[in-house]
Image (cartoon, rainbow, N blue to C red):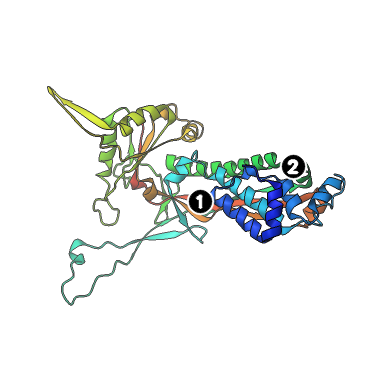
Amino acid sequence: MTINIRELRKRIELDGAESTVKHLTEALKQGDLKPDDFSIRDLAESFIPGGLSQIEQMEVSDSTWLTENVAIPFVNTVGAVIDTKIKEAYNHETFAVSKLVRTVPTRLNGEKIHTFGAVADDVLTVTAGSLYKSADLHADYIETPSTTKHGVIIPVTKEAVFFDQTHHLLERAAEIGELLAMNKERRILDMVLGITNTYKQNGVTRDTYNAGGTSQPWKNLLANNELLNWESIETAEDVFGEMVDPITNTPILIEPNAVLVMPPKRHIAHRLFYASSVSYEDGATASTIRNPFAKYRLVSSRLAFQRLKTQQGVTNPEKIWFIGNFRKAFAYMENWGITVTRSTPGDDADFTRDIVVRFKASERGVPAVIDPRYVVKCTG
């Protein structure tokens, strides 16, 4: 639904420019309007006083035609359109692994997170009139990496308004959103895949995945367990039963709920995890039950497949898969999410480069391993 310029002008006359901007912005947020419904030239003609006559009578060589008469409502509306387009691309379902981990808002540039001290079962019992014991912070801690900022500026030139290059502007906005999302997805994937190892406990950096043994504090790397059948899943699930708390040495109650596979294995994974029922045969006896693995969320990532090949040199990356509770194992420590801000009209870029306004898209954060015991990596 393309916005009718006559109706837009009429609404501005009746409700005022500020109220119209709020209405259009809200419609974009609710999805009632799409960025492609707008024309930046129509917006300029409608919101800028005398905009129609100025645009029709101007010459391209006149570099002051818009910057001297620019209206804040016009700039804000264009900003809302670009903001929506960037975030649509940034939040696209293609970047599925970013949604597997939890986002933790933080005001710090790297954190030291202490664990709670161990509380024995007998201490939990409180007799009448007795004091409750306190679960104090323990001396053990983990450190998250320093956050990094990523962003790009999108300029809106005089030519973009004059020639109504809305389509090209929106394409650029979508590319920026995708670029920032891809950057975040890649950094998170490198952490999940074990390409980067940032788990730092008590000042010691350790690999995310370990095969076990006396020198390794946990086992979550399982060799020779390619995803082939139900037994592959059961073998991986059994590893969680051996996980113990590093402080109390008591079993950790881990409920795996998600699986990450490579694209060549996605059809096998669909058959295993999304089958409605499972049949078992024991000699002459056969039985059918509801699929016990249907609880899992299944994610496949082409980027993960490529990163394993290019960054780790894995010969058969299709044989690698992951299972566990990714939200408890990993986090994205976020100072701020994707944010779009604008420049002030009339700055130096107006005169030197014919830029009407600039929009800056940025985000700041870092992937962090919180507790690697909650995810098991399986190889073929």
Question: What is the C-alpha distance between the residues marked 1 and 2?
Answer: 38 Å
Q: Secondary structure at mark 1?
A: strand
Q: Residue at x 38, y 61 (%)?
A: 114
- Image coordinates for residue 52, horizontal then vertical, percent: 80, 49
Q: In the image, residue 290 lies at what x, y percent?
A: 23, 35
Residue count near mark 1 (Cα–Cα under 10 Å), binned few <14, some 14–19, many ≥20: many
Hey, what amino acid is under mark 1?
A: Val
Quarter of the image with the N terminus is top right
Left or right side of 170 for 264: left
Q: Nearer the viewer, mark 1 or mark 2?
A: 2
| Residue at 68% over, 46% down | 4
Rendering coords of residue 157 (x, y %):
76, 47
Query: Which mark sits nearer the N-terminus, 1 or 2?
Result: 2
Picture coordinates of residue 292 (x, y %)?
25, 37
Q: Residue 176's image quarter?
A: top right
10 Å neighbourhood of mark 2: few (<14), some, or many (≥20)? some
* Residue 75 at least partly seen: no
Residue that badge 2 annotates? 164
Q: Secondary structure at mark 2?
A: loop
Quarter of the figure that contains the C terminus: top left
Q: Amino acid at mark 2?
A: Asp
Q: Which residue is mark 1?
A: 366
On screen, residue 286 versus residue 345, left or right, reads left
Of all residues, the one furthest to the bottom in this rendering is 129
Q: Which is nearer the eye, 15 or 284?
A: 15
Query: In this orientation, which residue lies closer to the viewer: 42 or 90?
Result: 42
